[in-house]
Image: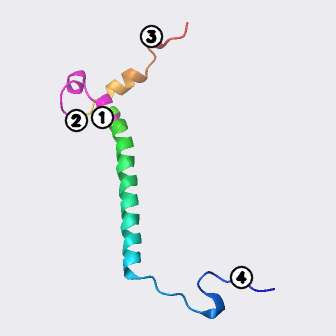
């Protein structure tokens, strides 16, 4: 019965060093993969940030081109979370 060895280390031979071009290609591929993942996560999170920012605006601010609410209006959140006649069960 023989012992199982790791690939590239058969018969006690040391592993061959990875060439610089291959290491660079792997690094650039990892950077590209992470960049795509970050861009996709931002694309998925932006609508939620927009909804949250719009919910903290007054009616006039929500219809204006401004992106960030000035000032934050927390009363709209309380008003929307309270039971309303349209949401009441019969």
The label number, if any, that marks residue 53 in the structure image: 1
Instruction: Please tell me whether mark 1 or mark 4 is closer to you in this view.
Output: 4
- Note whether 17 is above or below 80 in the view shown: below
Q: Are marks 1 and 3 in contact (CB under 8 Å)?
A: no
| Secondary structure found at label 1 | helix
Q: Residue at x 33, y 40 (%)?
A: 46
The label number, if any, that marks residue 86 in the structure image: 3
- Note whether 26 is above or below 47 in the view shown: below
For the C terminus, the image quarter is top right
| Secondary structure found at label 4 | loop
Asked if residue 13 is among those painted magenta in the image, a careful observer would answer: no
Write the start and end of the magenta stretch as one range: 52-68
- Mark 2 vs mark 1: which is more N-terminal? 1
The label number, if any, that marks residue 65 in the structure image: none
Residue hosting label 2:
67
Instruction: Please tell me whether mark 2 or mark 3 is closer to you in this view.
Output: 2
Q: Are marks 2 and 1 in contact (CB under 8 Å)?
A: yes
- Note whether 58 is above or below 2 in the view shown: above
Among the 4 quarters of the image, the one containing residue 55: top left
Query: Would you call the spot at circle 4 few (<14 residues within 10 Å), some (14-19), or many (20 or more)?
Result: few
For the N terminus, the image quarter is bottom right
Given residues 22 and 66, the one toward you in this image is 22
Residue hosting label 4:
4
- Mark 2 vs mark 3: which is more N-terminal? 2
Given residues 19 and 75, the one toward you in this image is 19
| Secondary structure found at label 2 | loop
Q: CA distance from mark 2 to mark 4?
A: 62 Å
Query: Would you call the spot at circle 1 few (<14 residues within 10 Å), some (14-19), or many (20 or more)?
Result: some
**74 displayed left or right of 90:** left
Q: Position of residue 53 (x, y in %)?
A: 30, 34
């Amino acid at each position: 019965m023989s012992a199982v060895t790791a690939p590239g280390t058969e018969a006690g031979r040391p592993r061959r060093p990875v060439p610089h071009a291959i290491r660079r290609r792997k690094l650039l591929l990892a950077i590209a993969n992470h960049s795509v993942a970050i861009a996709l996560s931002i694309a998925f999170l932006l609508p939620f940030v927009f909804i949250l920012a719009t919910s903290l605006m007054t009616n006039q601010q929500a219809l204006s081109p401004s992106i960030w609410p000035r000032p934050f209006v927390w009363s709209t959140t309380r008003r929307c979370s309270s039971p309303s006649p349209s949401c009441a069960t019969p």
